[in-house]
Image (cartoon, rainbow, N blue to C red):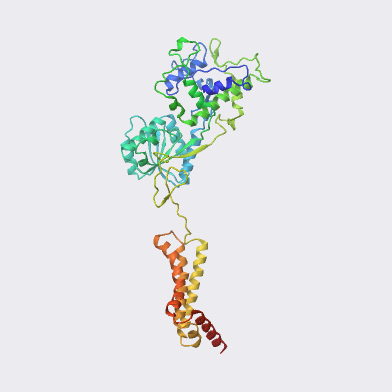
Amino acid sequence: MRFAVDEINNSTNLLPNVSLGYEIFDHCSSTQSFPDVVKLLSVNNLVQPWDEPHNNLSRILGVVSYAATVSVFSKKAVFPSFLRTVHSNKIAIEGIVNILKHFNWRWVAFLNSDDDYGNDGLALFMKKIKDTEICLAYNKGLNQYTDHSQTFKQIEAQKINIIIVFALKMTAEALIKSAIQLNFTNKVWIADEEWSLNKNLPKIKGIRNVGTVIGISEQAVNVPGVNDFIYSSRRQTYCENASQNIYCNQFFNRSSLSTEDVVAADPSFNFPVYTAVYAIAHALHNALQCESGRCNDNITVFPHMRSNGHLNILYPHQVLAELKKSNFTLLNESIRFDENGDPNYGSYSVVFWNHSEDAYRCIDCKETEWSAAGSTSCNLRSVEYIPFTDTGAILIMVGAWALVGFTLAVSVLFAINYNTPVVRSAGGPMCFLILVCLSLCSISVFFYFGEPTTSFCILSLYSFLLWYFIPKCYIIIFQSDRNTHEYFQRLIQNYTKTISQ
């Protein structure tokens, strides 16, 4: 956020001669941050959120959120002034259901954090699978007191192999760590965007044993320059106490975080935060009629609520209207909001955990596995074959049986007329050898269809060659006292002579 504000304040095109300010609150606790947010938007502390309920509070707050995904915020009748730069849980659930359908997974468990986020995901999931073949075999709301061992026992009892974990980061981390410790293995875990890009879990010893992890995440967009800004800002000296300087009103204990920790944080948040700041800046730019390199100095936009003796809501509707009409390009992405205030841009990515402990240490794949160049994992070979029910296979097999039937009929005919000059001149006993080998060659085509096995592979490769060359070997080995070329010439002459008679 600070990077975006700094970038805008240094811009000569966006909000010229206007500087944006900011006040940052820790969002990890709603009870701690929400009063400060209301205080920021009010004048003379007119709004005291914990004193008495305010039915119109949702209409007072004009918010562009970069992290709130609960679907209820899409209801404009309740939250008319709420916009966001992240997609609703509804989109995430649709992605998860599409994964289940793609792999034909029908018997699943849904583990969600026992809060607004997780319960919203559960409600959306149950609604989405209502008219499908997907069955929710088990559901559990997770919190800090959940007995994971009991949860895993119940999943095993239901013989469930597909587990959807729709939970906040800390809840999901605790669950996966328990799965490793309790040796709960060989499952398919579907991660929501809260932990699909988790940097810590893939490094834990034994993570391979839990099974396959597939997740969804909003596509991470690289924000150029943000990492350099983080490194440079971390080198600056900050006040130890905010009271030391009127401009130093944002301070915190940085001893627990290194610069690398900040840079390595979930990258999917960068672009939503960046977009939220720019959306507000563009709305102000239009509301202040910033044209010809300067904004209109005669226009005053109040960023707060005011009162004339009683609570009177005077929200800066001009800015809100411009926010809803947002249509600008940021990092090659067209930024717009739909009628619900949700982002009308962006997409989700499917994330697959390779469970690779060292991306630069080569490992040997099994005989039944393969690995692409530069890959950090081994993949099972996909078996492709022509089934017996294939139309082409049926036609070939019918033709082969017809040829076998024809050769058997000729064999019977030759046996009946064995002592006739025609049969004897055609080769006598050798005719039967040739006809038998021809039938076996025809039968060999059956080994090319159906799921391949070791015996089928051997027979398909060698049976045709064997039956094809046996007659020739017979001539060479057992007729070695004759000149083969002269023998065949005499055989043809006898056959021609017999026909003429």
Task: Choose between 382 and 487: the one closer to the eye.
Answer: 487
Against 293, is 171 above or below?
Answer: below
Point out the image quarter for the C terminus.
bottom right
437 or 135: nearer the eye? 437
Q: Is residue 57 visible?
A: yes
Query: Residue 56's x, y, as percent?
Result: 51, 20
Q: Is residue 388 above or below residue 90?
A: below
Please give the name of the residue rendered at 34% of the width and 37% of the height, measured from the top-left corner.
Answer: 205
Indicate whether 105 appears above or below 297. Answer: below
- The image shows residue 96 at horizontal and vertical percentages of 47, 40
Q: Residue 302's spot in the image, x, y percent?
A: 58, 15
Say if 190 sits above or below 383 in the image.
Answer: above
- Image check: 458 left or right of 501? left
Percent coordinates x, y for residue 378 in the rendering? 42, 46
In-image side of 89 versus 357 (left or right): right
Tell which residue pokes out farthest to the bottom in this image: 501
